[in-house]
Image (spheres, rainbow, N blue to C red):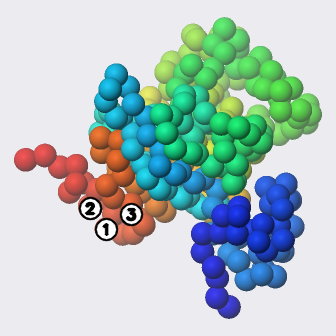
């Protein structure tokens, strides 16, 4: 059986799928099998001729980037390379000077559909820090239209990740350590079981045990092939352990796009080494 890689929305429409992002995952898998299309090669995020300029300086310039459904995509680069800018453009938090970001075939500037299947945590401004963690999670539970049982299962699923350091402490989020605030934000991004997860420097501030727990969590999500993960990190080892594809961003441009292998870490260390 031969698979056709990288199918986008227009090509799926040509197969008779008018709005494939409305399909249930099981239905889409069945359709893909029938038409010999690899479910994991359907394009989830596509960037076309995307630029962002601040003060006359181009900080991001990406002509084409495609991220397939189910990919674990890592983004690395030095400070100021454009990693956070790219994620903020994908989430429509800032406007590009030119170009387009498509999520599941829809322009994020003109469609709200992507918001219902995307979870993200970029920094602590995403938190409502005058709430306790329980109040914050209960608020999100209502926003997502989840049940009390869903919230209880969420607490159970993340008990190991929280490590008895988050719930029941009778403290506002703002009064927790940076690492524990990071835990709250990451867990909140996963609360509604998103199809796309975007995390900017998620390992920052986490203690070694929690870093390992987070890597295990991301790898489990990735192995299920039901979620597309975009992660940026300054820690090359972490990103090679959780991503099967890594892009190197320099001065706003992607200069390397690497499929992760046994030698990827050494290759990245060689690129970032200084004489």
User: At x 51% / y 18%, what residue is drawn?
Assistant: 177
In the displayed structure, 114 sits above or below 36; it is above
Determine crowd level at label 3: few under 14, some 14-19, many 20+ residues with C-alpha closer than 10 A: some
Q: Disc 2 on helix, strand or loop?
A: helix
**Left or right of residue 5, residue 48 in this image:** left
Q: Disc 3 on helix, strand or loop?
A: strand
**Left or right of residue 125, residue 262 in this image:** left
Q: What label sits on residue 131 in the rendered view?
A: none
* Sequence-earlier tag: 2 or 3: 3
Q: Front-most of 16 and 24?
A: 16
Q: Is disc 2 in contact with disc 3, using a CB cutoff of under 8 Å?
A: yes
**Residue 31 at x, y = what percent?**
82, 74
- How much space separates mark 2 and mark 3, taking CA atoms? 10 Å
In the displayed structure, 254 sits above or below 167; it is below
Q: Is disc 3 in contact with disc 1, using a CB cutoff of under 8 Å?
A: no
Q: Quadrant of residue 90?
A: top right
**Where does label 3 land, which residue?**
258
Q: Nearer the viewer, mark 2 or mark 3?
A: 3
Determine crowd level at label 1: few under 14, some 14-19, many 20+ residues with C-alpha closer than 10 A: few
Determine crowd level at label 2: few under 14, some 14-19, many 20+ residues with C-alpha closer than 10 A: few
Q: Front-most of 62 and 204?
A: 62
**Where does label 2 land, which residue?**
267
**Where does label 1 land, which residue?**
263
**Residue 27 at x, y = what percent?**
87, 67
């Amino acid at each position: 059986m031969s698979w056709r890689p990288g199918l986008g929305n227009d090509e799926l429409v040509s197969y008779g799928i008018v709005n494939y992002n409305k399909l249930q995952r099981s239905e889409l898998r069945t359709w893909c099998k029938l038409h010999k299309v690899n479910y994991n090669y359907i394009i989830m995020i596509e960037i076309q001729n995307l630029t962002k300029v601040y003060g006359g300086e181009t900080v991001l310039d990406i002509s084409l980037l495609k991220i397939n459904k189910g990919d674990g995509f890592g983004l690395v680069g030095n400070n100021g390379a454009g990693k956070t800018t790219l994620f903020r453009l994908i989430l429509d938090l800032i406007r590009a000077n030119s170009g387009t970001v498509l999520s599941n075939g829809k322009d994020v500037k003109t469609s709200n559909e992507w918001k219902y299947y995307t979870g993200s945590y970029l920094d602590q401004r995403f938190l409502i820090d005058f709430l306790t963690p329980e109040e914050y999670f209960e608020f999100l539970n209502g926003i997502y239209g989840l049940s009390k049982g869903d919230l209880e299962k969420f607490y159970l699923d993340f008990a190991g990740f929280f490590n008895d350091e988050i719930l029941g402490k009778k403290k506002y989020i703002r009064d927790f350590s940076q690492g524990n605030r990071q835990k709250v934000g990451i867990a909140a991004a996963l609360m509604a079981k998103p199809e796309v997860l975007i995390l900017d420097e998620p390992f920052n501030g986490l203690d070694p045990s929690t870093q390992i727990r987070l890597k295990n969590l991301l790898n489990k999500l990735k192995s299920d092939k039901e979620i597309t993960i975009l992660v940026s990190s300054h820690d090359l080892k972490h990103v090679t352990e959780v991503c099967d594809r890594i892009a190197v961003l320099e001065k706003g441009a992607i200069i390397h796009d690497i499929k992760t292998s046994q030698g990827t870490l050494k290759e990245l260390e060689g690129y970032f080494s200084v004489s």
